[in-house]
Image (spheres, grey):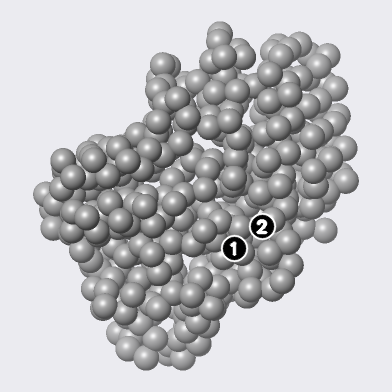
Amino acid sequence: MSYEEVREVDPAVADALVGERSRQEHTLAMIASENHVSEAVMEAQSSELTNKYAEGYPGSRYYGGCEYADDVEEIAVERAKELFGADHVNVQPHSGSSANMGVYFATLEPGDKILSLDLTHGGHLSHGHPANFAGQLYEVEQYEVDPETGRLDYESLREHAEAFEPDMIVSGFSAYPREVEWERIQAAADAVGALHTADIAHITGLVAAGEHASPVGVADFVTGSTHKTIRAGRGGIIMCDEQFADDVDSAVFPGAQGGPLMHNIAGKAVGFHEALQPEFEDYAAQVVENAAVLGDRLEEHGFSLVSGGTDTHLVLVDLRDSHPDVSGGDVEDELEEVGIVLNANTVPDETRSAFDPSGIRIGTPALTTRGFDADAMETVADSIARVVDNLGDEDVYADVSDTVDDLCEQYPLYE
Ligand SMILES: Cc1ncc(COP(=O)(O)O)c(C=O)c1O
């Protein structure tokens, strides 16, 4: 895309769009929730469907002229069903957070109880943080990972559920590097008569490709984002059994949203098609392998990984052992100077503040989309280690910047 049309109307925004494209081309995107969608997904997202109002659902809309909107939404739903094996799918949530809102509105009353993972242990705002609607509408208690192992403690989760008697247990996480045993969480929910939402926002692509166990058919509800590991149009998705279908659909519209973002739903449909191709399984396997290689190499450089490794698309580095005087925020800033973009993150038993925590979260989905293999990931790990071990050393930064440039040239984006 040249953005010529935008430039004619609005040079300031055209500059920003060109700048962003260049930033993505010339830096390494290692924010675990990000990815690079295909040009086909981008084209669908920028289609004329952005003009269309289609409140309601296929075949039952509040507006005329919805035949193509219906086609696109039906295609997206069918493909999601095929990808995940879900009975019922709603592709209208504007985001992963909105998908969670849809499930809560379908099942909970204000004041009902949610049990979810603490944000600083890897949970998400929309699971009940006080700053989020979920924390304001519902009574929330939070479980934690085991501080020794960095892993979920299913036994203590079950005990917590027995004591708190929640209406909803939320699982699925933002910064948890290990495979989740969905059945054990569902069993804890069943034992206390709670519902269970598995939020697979981060790992949707890994689940679709069979690289991570699927909660579909196990958890009562599965929610997710569609633009992270699954690389489809930006937004959210809800999956559930037929018994909850009507409640979920009416909670999303008219309960929480107005007109669906039909252009994004077109992008979801195209991305789901891509995820149904055999190459996507190779991609997802490479994402996981790359994360493992990255983690191993960082450990060789003396870094500590929360839980001692990863089974997923991300590693969570706890800087306190290897670099006690350095915060995650410092590392995030300094790595950005050399073109490596990732985020500071809290770690279990955080001793700094959430604004400048002790960890960094590093993800491989976007680089794997560019074609990075295990060797390239080792080079990236070496580069990260060099910067963190030599903070402020301009010669090192210049050298690592050159390495980043070489990698970007070797693995181009949007040829
Ligand atoms: C577990 C989890 N749920 C929900 C979300 C929210 O997704 P979105 O940004 O699409 O609202 C995120 C975002 O990263 C997440 O990690």
Q: Residue at x 67, y 34 (%)?
A: 295
Q: Dividing the image into 4 quarters, which one contains the C terminus?
A: bottom right
Give the number of the disc on residue 210.
Answer: 1
Residue 244 at least partly seen: yes
Image x and y of residue 152, in percent: 41, 39
Q: Please state the horizontal and vertical placement of residue 259, each as a whole percent of the image.
A: 35, 72
Quarter that holds the N terminus: bottom right
Numbered circles on residues, count: 2
Residue at 36% over, 62% down? 219
Amino acid type at circle 1 is Gly
Task: Please tell me whether residue 22 is drawn above or below residue 269 in the rendered image.
Answer: above
The answer to whether the beta carbon of the residue marked 2 is less than 8 Å from any atom of ligand 1 is: no
Residue 321 falls left or right of residue 252? right
Q: Quadrant of residue 57?
A: bottom left
Dot label at residue 284: 2
Whether residue 190 sits left or right of residue 346 in the image: it is left
The residues bearing labels 2 and 1 have C-alpha atoms spaced at a distance of 8 Å
Displayed quadrant of residue 257: bottom left
Q: Report the residue at 59% width, 63% height from top.
A: 210
**CB contact under 8 Å: marks 2 and 1:** yes
Q: Is residue 376 left or right of residue 345?
A: right
